[in-house]
């Protein structure tokens, strides 16, 4: 079978860049004021150290017992600033949906997210759609996400769409997400959860309402069988190797332990972001999953090159 080809995670840099984060106006204001005050204080300390340092023969410095106007100013200014920030924070909390452990307005969640080891499961209760590692939402509309974990604590975070929220085994939290514009947004697990914490990433695809509705209809439909011999052989190998004991594919298998693969070919990444989804990378992954993402549940099945080629053709045809 030969050595497992190496892979380069840096090939994902453009795909999974999470460094461009739009901060809220309130946060920006507080940060700017805090930096300005810090610089002012540091500057005054540096000036005082130089201007009023002790000099030989200088004697005892003149004692100054206070300046009423200055004392009123440095008391009133911080008080006014605190009152202003408190008011702005209060208005922000009143106008922004608050996440937490209570189901808002008694409504059903739009999406149920479960943190796994180390991947994400997303279920849409209304449509019955289940996907893995890649979440689709309508742009311009808030969606309510129910959060829980399968076995350890995770933290769900898509910086551009909402705040962080913990995911606990046996506990349910709720979080509002909103993408103001269509696009691809990148998220991570923000709570250390084990060996592959750094590669527990997710992608949110925000679509216009019509495109989102079309995506839901497509996900509700099983992929059409491919007539070519190689994908057909891959389907037979998938069944013969009992891959369906862990993975679900509509009309083929109903496994729940691993990611749902029904429309695997249309996804952007493999194994929660560790590789971009290309036939070449999928072949690398199937040769030895543990070499690509050590510690995951999927073992090395020691597939032959012929089996790998057939499985790649079959899985990539699932769109």
Image (spheres, grey):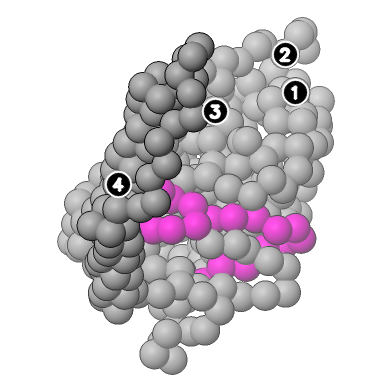
**Spot occupied by residue 65 in the image (x, y as percentages of width and height):** 39, 51
Q: Which residue is mark 1?
A: 291
Q: Which residue is mark 3?
A: 275
Numbered tag placed on residue 13 in the rendering: none
Q: Which residue is mark 2?
A: 4
Q: Could you tell whether 312 is left or right of 48 in the image?
A: right
Could you tell me how far apart the alpha carbons at marks 3 and 2 are, in whole angstroms?
A: 15 Å
Could you tell me how far apart the alpha carbons at marks 4 and 1 are, in whole angstroms?
A: 48 Å
Could you tell me how far apart the alpha carbons at marks 2 and 4 are, in whole angstroms?
A: 53 Å
The residue mark sitting in front, 1 or 2, is 1
Numbered tag placed on residue 33 in the rendering: 4
**Which residue is at a point 31% across and 75% down the rendered structure image?**
90
Residue bounds of the magenta highlight: 142-164
Q: Could you tell whether 77 is left or right of 47 in the image?
A: left
**Which residue is at a point 52% across and 84% down the rendered structure image?**
102
Is the residue marked by circle 4 packed among few (<14), some (14-19), or many (20+) residues within 10 Å? few
Could you tell me how far apart the alpha carbons at marks 1 and 2 are, in whole angstroms?
A: 8 Å
Is the residue marked by circle 3 packed among few (<14), some (14-19), or many (20+) residues within 10 Å? many
Q: Is residue 240 in view?
A: no
Mark 3 vs mark 1: which is more N-terminal? Answer: 3
The residue mark sitting in front, 3 or 2, is 3
**Spot occupied by residue 180 in the image (x, y as percentages of width and height):** 21, 56
Number of labels in the image equals 4
The foreground one among 102 and 133 is 102
């Amino acid at each position: 079978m030969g050595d497992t080809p190496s892979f380069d995670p840096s090939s994902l840099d453009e795909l999974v860049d999470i460094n461009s984060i739009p901060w809220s106006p309130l946060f920006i204001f507080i940060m700017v004021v805090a930096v300005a005050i810090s610089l002012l204080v540091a500057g005054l300390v540096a000036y005082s150290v130089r201007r009023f340092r002790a000099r030989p023969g200088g004697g005892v410095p003149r004692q100054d017992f206070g300046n009423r106007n200055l004392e009123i100013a440095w008391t009133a200014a911080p008080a006014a600033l605190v009152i202003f920030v408190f008011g702005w924070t209060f208005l922000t909390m009143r106008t922004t949906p608050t996440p937490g452990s209570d189901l808002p307005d008694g409504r059903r969640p739009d999406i149920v997210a479960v943190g796994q080891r180390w991947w994400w499961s997303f279920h849409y209760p209304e449509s019955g759609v289940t996907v893995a590692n890649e979440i689709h939402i309508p742009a311009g509309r808030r969606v309510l996400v129910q959060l829980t974990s399968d076995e350890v604590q995770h933290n769900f975070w898509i910086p551009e769409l909402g705040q962080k929220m913990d995911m606990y085994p046996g506990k349910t939290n709720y979080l509002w997400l909103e993408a103001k514009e269509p696009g691809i947004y990148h998220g991570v697990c923000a709570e250390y959860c084990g060996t592959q914490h750094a590669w527990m990433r997710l992608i949110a695809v925000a679509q216009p309402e019509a495109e989102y509705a079309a995506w839901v209809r497509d996900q509700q439909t099983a992929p059409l069988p491919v007539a070519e011999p190689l994908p057909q052989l891959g389907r037979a190998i998938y069944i013969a190797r009992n891959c369906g004991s862990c993975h679900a594919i509509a009309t083929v298998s109903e496994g729940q332990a691993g990611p749902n693969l029904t429309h695997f070919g249309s996804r952007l990444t493999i194994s929660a972001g560790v590789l971009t989804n290309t036939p070449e990378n999928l072949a690398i992954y199937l040769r030895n999953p543990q070499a690509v993402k050590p510690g995951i549940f999927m073992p090395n099945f020691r597939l032959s090159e012929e089996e790998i080629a057939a499985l790649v053709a079959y899985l990539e045809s699932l769109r």
